[in-house]
Amino acid sequence: MQFSSSLLENAVSEFAKLPGIGKKTALRLVLHLLKQDTGDVSNFSEVIARMRSEIKFCQRCYNVADADICSICANSMRKQEIICVVESIRDVIAIESTQQFNGTYHVLGGVISPLDGIGPDQLNIESLVNRIQKETTAELIFALNPTIQGDTTIYYIQKKLSPGSGGQLPQLRITTIARGIAFGGELEYADEMTLARSLQNRLPVESYVASK
Amino acid sequence: MLSLPSISLLQFKNYTNRSFDFKERIIGICGNNGAGKTNLLDAVHYLCFTKSYFSRLDGNNVQQGKSGFRLEGHFLLQDKPEKTICILRETGKKEFSVNDQPYDKFSQHIGRYPCVVIAPDDAVLITGGSEERRKFFDSLLSQLDADYLQHLIVYTKVLQQRNSLLKSFAETTVKDFSLLEVLDEQLIKPGEYIFNKRKEFFVSFLPQAKHLYSEIAMQPEDVTLLYESQLLQSSFAELLKATRQKDCYAQRTTAGIHRDDIEISLGNQLFRNIASQGQRKSLLFALKLAEMEVLRKEKGFPPLLLLDDVFEKLDESRINNLLQKVCVENEGQVFITDTNEERLKQHLDALSVQYQLIGL
């Protein structure tokens, strides 16, 4: 792509660095901004710059926050003794929008994958173990993706919490989210592994009806 | 039953546009080097497995100077006609359909038309490293049991993770053994599953291959086929524990089902070291015919058999025994290529079966 202005070119190449944005879309966005008032555009760039420089990560759960502790951790109405372990902030947003969970979170920042150079030390695992030992946690819910790396991470944390290494709190319950047929899904389109697993871990009808 | 009454090839390898009618159960294909015998067999293989037997890249099968190819086969599966089409578009996109119903995933097609190929390069199965033999048995077992393939995929992924962890151990002084233990546990479940499936399978498969070998060789040669696995001696969990030190040093996993092999010996020496070319070939046939038998039992009808240039380096009596096995004792359709038309004719005449000869 040829540009008559290097200012334009720089802006386009910066936009094109964003995920899912190619050169052409970047150009469209930049040309759109060019049509806006200067004030609006400087406000736009200021908001982005402030977002990046002023945002904080909760010291307790590593979720995004405006203060040292995020609004979820600071909310006394939520059950502080229940921790839901997730991979990223996006998962927090996904679970929050279900409006079904009234506990707290712990954001790991990834899953263990030595192949990608990610070991337990790169993740917020030690802080989770410390947190459980310090607080009176009653339940730990793993809401990780159903992949091999997700499983590795679950087993690893479970091992860290087992009585042999450091002492698991006797009242701590460890669970994972259910895996199976999607809501409104059709059986014939479900992949075989999911269907087989749903059959293995089938539910009594009473609890199925109750959960609806 | 499964048969292929006709096929047409467009811009495939050396064929610009050509159709063939296969009227008999036994099809002999003759021609000089480069006439296109193997290419015709590969076209059949394409329609059975959605890919070439010989080259990984679809683009390699396009006629020189052209772009894209089309293969159309008219199969008969349990007396029902099926029109199977494989198209490689100019863009490099491959399309595959049966009776005008395109597949989303090509893997869904595999197994519909069971097919066994015997080609000269397959000798690596005997002479090559253990990886070749594992590949052969894994693909056979995966066709019989979809769970086997799933476990194999999981095993391979966890193994890669474990190996990179072992590599990273070499770079740091602090070693996180609890992570290694977690990966060990994840490796054990699919590993034990695959081991048990293989062990169970070989109990009947290996004696059968040995029996077929002695029938082709027509003399009691002292061949033994043995399933070799470290898991035969102790459990996978114990193995991983015992080799941990060694694994850290080698920076890779030294124990497991990824090291399994079929040890083949003649007398008390390794078969691949002392066997003659003819003996190797005979053993290859024995393994492939045993594969054919397994597929026949599984599907309820015999697979298509593609024999590419199999007579070279075999003595007359072995050729006869082989043809007796594949043409007379087997009820499925057989395609045989040879450069020497007279030789092929002579051997097929001796069998007193109906056959069709195609000259290229």
Image: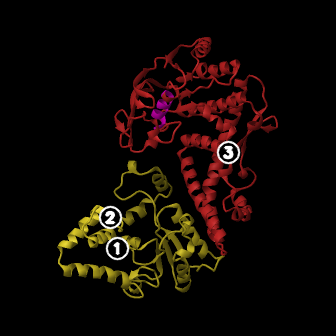
Q: Give the residue at mark 1.
A: A99
- Which residue is at the front of the view, A167 or A60? A60
Chain to which mark 1 belongs: A
- Which residue is at the front of the view, A57 or B112? A57
Q: Position of residue B161 (x, y in %)?
A: 58, 62
- State the separation of the CA atoms marked 1 and 3: 55 Å
Is B159 situated left or right of A34 in this image?
Answer: right
Q: Which residues are magenta?
A: B40-50
Tell me whether circle 2 and circle 3 mark residues in contact (CB < 8 Å).
Answer: no
Residue type indicated by callout 1:
Gln
Residue drawn at 61 percent across, 40 percent down? B136
Q: Give the residue at mark 2.
A: A21
Query: Considering the numbered disc 1 on the image, is that residue within a helix, a strand or a loop?
Result: loop
Predominant SS of the magenta segment: helix
Mark 2 neighbour density, 10 Å: few (under 14) some (14–19) many (20 or more): few
Q: Give the residue at mark 3.
A: B130
Where residue A23 sits, quadrant-wise, is: bottom left
Question: Do callouts 2 and 3 point to residues on the same chain?
Answer: no
Q: Could you tell which of marks 2 and 1 lies nearer the N-terminus?
A: 2
Is A46 situated left or right of B331 in this image?
Answer: left
Residue type indicated by callout 2:
Ile
Residue type indicated by callout 3:
Ser
Residue B332 makes an appearance in the image: no
Residue B21 makes an appearance in the image: yes
- State the separation of the CA atoms marked 2 and 3: 47 Å
